[in-house]
Image: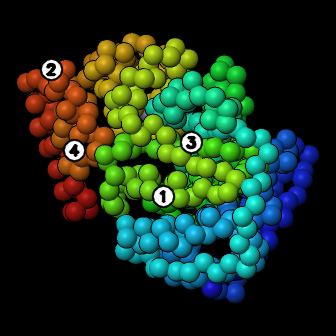
């Protein structure tokens, strides 16, 4: 059995740490979240909500029930018991159905500020989420951005992930101040504790940070990469389950929504390209430490290529020539399209882009040449792997 003990808070000079000890197989460890002191008044120490959500994967992975030594939100407990555990076990057969054993269920609403927030990475989804809420009024208006270190900068955490977190934050911070918003950063050792792939666990990791700040956020928008009609139980694309999981992580104090679900990736890209602030700050790159980089985006990785192709098809790529190597892209454009067409396992977003490229007459004989070239290259790499 996993036991989670009541959270405690420690204040340092600039930052405070909220932490809870937990016991697993006789071993005691501590899960912590670190954030600037100014947000301390909004931290929930009365309930274990954030810690339960964070450590749930540890229970599912090890098959151990989770016993709570402090209160949990009654609504969250109900949702975990009736929906979350079953949905996660259905999508991943490696998980075991476990029980959460509460001591006290709480129906308190802690929220004092009545504001809304959303995560900001300066990628397509977070920008789309922000611009889609420009007209909303309090408590739905986005007044804060968040930026968390719980796996998106490196699955297993550690110092390298922490460095990337700090590096990427600079861009996020500059954009936020340009649009007059604060960014709340939360660092955590959750990645080190879970030791699990980010792609399979990211949604609950992120929401655990949000639940630390229930006194601040009345509403929180989680920018998922998925669209309504992509809903499915698929272990390889767990984002397609976000629209079921995320709203079910709401509590009496904080409602959590999956935002921008009405837009396809192409529509999101089109939406954000209408706002000139994005031209300087769009950051989609998965290679944050590419050497000698003259652009914010490496312009070579999967996400860079896909985004540049989308922008080119929309006729908007030149607007982003400050953050992408557009010259290089134009030289290798057909190779990029061939590379996309030759992919064996095409994601939903790849398929959507290919249809769009056809509609824009961007698939020609040159592309077919590069499709074959890329397919042969992939086969060669696979054979190398087998005979190594
Ligand atoms: Zn890149």
- Cα distance, mark 1 to mark 4? 29 Å
Q: Residue at x 60, y 78 (%)?
A: 100
- Cα distance, mark 4 to mark 2? 20 Å
Q: Which of the two labelled residues, at mark 3 and mark 1, occupies the earlier sequence position? A: 3
Q: Residue at x 32, y 60 (%)?
A: 234
Residue 130, visible in the rendered structure = yes
Foreground tag (1 vs 2): 1
Residue 373 coordinates in the image, percent (x, y): 14, 36
Considering every residue shown, the one lying at the far left of the view is: 365
- Cα distance, mark 1 to mark 2? 38 Å
Q: Residue at x 55, y 29 (%)?
A: 133
Q: Tell me the SS state at disc 2.
A: loop
Return the residue at label 3.
221
Q: Residue at x 36, y 28 (%)?
A: 267
Q: Tell me the SS state at disc 4.
A: loop
Closer to the camera in the image, 72 or 269: 72
Q: Which of the two labelled residues, at mark 2 and mark 3, occupies the earlier sequence position? A: 3
Residue 323's tag is: none
Return the residue at label 2.
361
| Residue 218 left/right relative to 318 | right
Residue 343's tag is: 4
10 Å crowding of disc 3: few (<14), some (14-19), many (20+)? many
User: Does the closest atom of ligand 1 sit within 8 Å of the Cβ of label 2?
Assistant: no
Return the residue at label 1.
245
Vertical position of residue 182 compared to residue 254: above or below? above
């Amino acid at each position: 059995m996993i036991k989670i003990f009541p959270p405690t808070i420690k204040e340092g000079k600039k930052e405070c740490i909220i932490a809870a000890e937990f016991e697993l197989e006789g071993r005691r460890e501590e899960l912590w979240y670190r954030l600037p002191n100014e947000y301390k008044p909004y931290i929930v120490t009365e309930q274990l909500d954030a810690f339960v959500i964070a450590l749930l994967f540890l229970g599912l992975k090890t098959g151990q029930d989770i016993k709570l030594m402090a209160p949990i939100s009654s609504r969250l407990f109900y949702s975990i018991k009736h929906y979350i555990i079953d949905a996660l076990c259905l999508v991943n057969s490696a998980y075991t159905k476990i029980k959460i054993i509460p001591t006290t269920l709480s129906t308190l609403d802690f929220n004092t500020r009545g504001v809304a927030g959303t995560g900001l990475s300066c990628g397509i989804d977070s920008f789309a989420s922000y611009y889609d809420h420009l007209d909303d009024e309090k408590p739905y208006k986005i007044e804060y951005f968040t930026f968390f270190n719980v796996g998106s900068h490196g699955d297993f955490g550690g110092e390298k992930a922490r460095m990337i977190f700090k590096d990427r934050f600079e861009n996020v911070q500059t954009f936020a101040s340009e649009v007059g918003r604060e960014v709340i950063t939360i660092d955590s050792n959750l990645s080190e504790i879970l030791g699990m792939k980010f792609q399979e666990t990211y949604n609950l990791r992120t929401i655990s940070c949000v639940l630390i700040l229930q006194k601040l956020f009345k509403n929180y928008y989680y920018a998922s990469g998925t669209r309504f009609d992509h809903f499915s139980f698929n272990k390889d694309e767990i984002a397609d389950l976000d629209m079921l999981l995320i709203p079910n992580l709401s509590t009496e104090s904080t409602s959590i929504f999956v935002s921008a679900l009405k837009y396809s990736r192409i529509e999101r890209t089109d939406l954000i390209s209408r706002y000139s602030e994005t031209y300087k700050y769009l950051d989609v790159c998965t290679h944050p430490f590419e050497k000698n980089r003259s652009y914010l985006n490496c312009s070579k990785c999967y996400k860079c290529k896909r985004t540049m192709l989308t922008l080119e098809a929309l006729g908007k790529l030149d607007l982003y020539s400050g953050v992408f190597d557009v010259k290089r892209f134009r030289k290798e454009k057909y190779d990029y399209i061939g590379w996309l067409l030759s992919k064996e396992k095409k994601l939903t977003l790849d398929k959507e882009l290919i249809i769009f490229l056809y509609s824009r007459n961007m698939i020609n004989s040159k592309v077919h040449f590069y499709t074959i070239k890329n397919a042969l290259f992939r086969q060669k790499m696979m054979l190398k792997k087998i005979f190594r």
